[in-house]
Amino acid sequence: NRVLTWQKAGFHFRTVKNYMNDPSGPMYYKGWYHIFYQHNPDAAYWGNITWGHAVSRDLLNWFHLPVAVKPDRWYDTFGVWTGSIMILPDGRVIMLYTGGTVEKYQNINLAEAADPSDPLLVEWVKYDAVNPVLNPPPGIGLTDFRDPNPIWINETDSTWYFVIGSKNDSLQHTGIAMVYTTKNFVNFTLLPHVLHSVDKVGMWECVELYAVATSGPPSTRGLDNFVWPGENVKHVLKASMNDEWHDYYAIGTFDPETMTWTPDDETMDVGIGLRFDWGKFYASRTFYDQVKQRRVQWSYVGEVDDRDADVKKGWASFQALPREVLFDVKTRTNLLTWPIKEVETLRMTSTNFCDITVEKGTTFELIVPDANQIDIEAEFQVNKEELEAAIEADIGYNCSTSGGATNRGQLGPFGLLVLANEDLSEQTATYFYVSRGTDGSLHTHLCQDEMRSSKAHNIVKRVVGGTFAVLDGELLSLRILVDHSIVESFAQGGRTSTTSRVYPTEAIYDAARVFLFNNATGVTVTAKSVKIWQMNSTINQYYDFKSQQA
Ligand code: DQQ
């Protein structure tokens, strides 16, 4: 059935059947990478939430295991929600997860891997005698208390510190990260002050705090969990804004002694400053990969069609490609997120183009063997004289309100059209938009225009994206991973990214194409180089215990 192309995901991790959302407990354990995820095993929509579980040798090919934890107790009847996994010094592997009672009140519960010698950690047992180990404290809403995550261990007395995300509406709709300490994961103490809070941004979900090294080669800049702040170590605080469904972060200073975190730049605080991805990308979660000494980020990409369509196709949502997270030593003001190196092992044949001049108001087709499952790397140069001649009084371009890829300005939009059909009536546009202020300053945006991405009905389509730094002498660079119905785009080596879930109806199979386009009125653009690789598919199936034993 040609229309159902969006049933396909060639190299992204998703459920075999039914629904998924947040990642939890990513880790490497006894030879396997593990990922747990919010999963409805019975339907292709949110509800009856369990912890789905899958393992991989390489973070690319995945084998789904039985559901790890499901709602079968009074304290988690409404669902086994997001949490975290800790490998303890004594070898036990424990889980803290958010539970919901029949009244939907949230609480925190303890479970443990039944057999830590099992590399697959298939079986989990709940601590019925002590659960729930935490309930919302006075002053916190009964439905605003979730997603426990360890942020620190005091090595001298083995005290663990956890954050729990919440909000305080008696202040100013303030997003908060509360801190609890514990030595045994059964008795917890709430610290009298929060780790951090930001007014007017609302409920914080899936809060994380982790260290990044601010100098050295990339291979040394991902840090293990719980690293002391220092001259070359900063801490990133991340929270998922429940009000607007976006993941925000800020870089700052963590003080383990006072258990507080302060942003480097208050105007760029969590929830008002930098985002991880401008598109469909939520509840992200990192882990330290001790095999490759790097920090890896997972995040789920939700559907933007309606529930009936998801039920028909039998599954919903997937995980964005795992991304490596690094401090950007060039700008020193943002992180870089970039698909893990292993993704490049999926590259097969490539088609290469160079020095293609794209005149104002034109498109240029990049002919490739197949345009449904590809990895694109492109570098653009804008004509210098024309760039310098352009002056824009209004430099406040905003992707979302810009009118998208067809709305022409002096220095943009230009970029690529992917999952496009021949007459371009279906296309997803990933583009740069540059503004040059009266003072000569340049402001560059990466935007993704979904408005023409599908002719199907009942789909939410937007123009998404934001601004990022381009340093003197840098070409504009773009990487786009297209996987049938997923478009993940990164600019300038990962200074910003934007992910779209799209549902082409005509630009599918051999009708799908890729184009360069330049809709700027004032500047000619040269694609200095464009490389397009055909991408291999990955394994995404149930683990076959029988054949493994044979
Ligand atoms: N999803 C979970 C919650 C979390 C939210 C429920 C974030 O624990 O706060 O499925 O997407």
Image: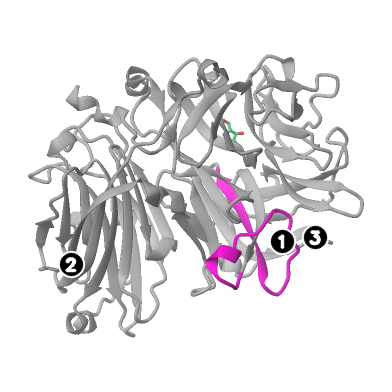
In the picture, the quarter occupied by the C terminus is: top right
* Label 2: few (<14), some (14–19) or many (≥20) C-alpha neighbours in 10 Å: few
Please, what is the three-letter code of the amino acid marked with disc 3?
Pro
Q: Which mark is residue 354?
A: 2
Q: Are marks 1 and 2 in contact (CB under 8 Å)?
A: no
Q: Amino acid at mark 1?
A: Trp
Q: Answer whether labels 3 and 2 touch (C-beta < 8 Å).
A: no
Say which quadrant the N terminus sits in.
top left
Q: Residues within 10 Å of mark 3 (few under 14, many from 20)?
A: some
Circle on res. 256: 3
Q: Residue 395: name its quadrant.
A: bottom left
Q: Left or right: where does residue 256 sit relative to residue 217?
A: right
Residue placed most toward the observer, 394 or 522: 522
Q: Amino acid at mark 2?
A: Cys
Residue matched to label 1: 261
Q: Secondary structure at mark 1?
A: strand
Label 3, ligand 1: CB separation under 8 Å: no
In three-dimensional space, the C-alpha distance between marks 1 and 3, rounded to whole angstroms, equals: 9 Å
Image quadrant of residue 68?
top right
Q: Quadrant of ligand 1?
A: top right
The secondary element bearing badge 3 is classed as: loop
Q: Residue 465 versus residue 62: which sits nearer the camera?
A: 62
Q: Is residue 224 magenta?
A: yes
Residue at (53% x, 57% y) in the render: 325
Mark 3 or mark 2: whose residue is earlier in sequence: 3
